[in-house]
Image (cartoon, rainbow, N blue to C red):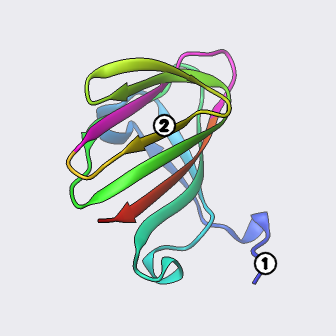
Amino acid sequence: MIRKSDQRTIEHKPAPFNGTGDITVRHLLSGPEEMYEKGRVFAHSTLQPGCAIGYHVHENESETYYIYSGQGEFNDNGSVVPVTAGDVTFTGAGEGHGLKNTGNEPLEFIALILYK
């Protein structure tokens, strides 16, 4: 199956997890059924400059980000580190994270959430 870009579900989520601004989420797969019930999100997401996903904890699932373009700050269980294009982050079950765009261009990343 090939899913063209105009066939993907696109969401605009305001202030995710008490963050700032909003995030655009382009779902690459349509959910758990297309992930053989092994996960719930595989998406290309965008944070505009100054926008952030607030810190949150994952229970019984992990989340991985592949930073595609831009720059930001990744909150890894309270430790804030810079991220740029090509970086990969991993947040395991029971751990928390957040992401903020600190640059002047959109921060684009691929997000993958898998069940434990």
Give the extent of the magenta segment.
95-107
Of residue 16 and residue 75, the one placed in the foreground of this image is 75
User: Picture coordinates of residue 55 (x, y %)?
Assistant: 29, 33
Give the labeled residue for mark 2: 22
Give the labeled residue for mark 1: 2
Determine if the magenta segment contains residue 66.
Answer: no
Q: CA distance from mark 1 to mark 2?
A: 28 Å
Of residue 40 and residue 115, the one placed in the foreground of this image is 115
Residue 28, picture quadrant: bottom right
Screen quadrant of the C terminus = bottom left
Amino acid at circle 2:
Asp
Determine if the magenta segment contains residue 101.
Answer: yes
Amino acid at circle 1:
Ile
Screen quadrant of the N terminus = bottom right
Residue 91, picture quadrant: top left
Per the image, label 1 sits on a secondary structure element best described as loop
Q: Is residue 110 visible?
A: yes
**Is residue 46 shown above or below 92?**
above
**From the viewer's perspective, is 104 left or right of 77?**
right
Q: Residue at x 36, y 30 (%)?
A: 19
Q: Residue at x 79, y 70 (%)?
A: 4
**Is residue 4 shown above or below 83?**
below
Q: Earlier in the sequence, mark 1 or mark 2?
A: 1
Numbered circles on residues, count: 2
User: Picture coordinates of residue 36 (x, y %)?
Assistant: 47, 83
**From the viewer's perspective, is 13 left or right of 29?**
left
Per the image, label 2 sits on a secondary structure element best described as strand
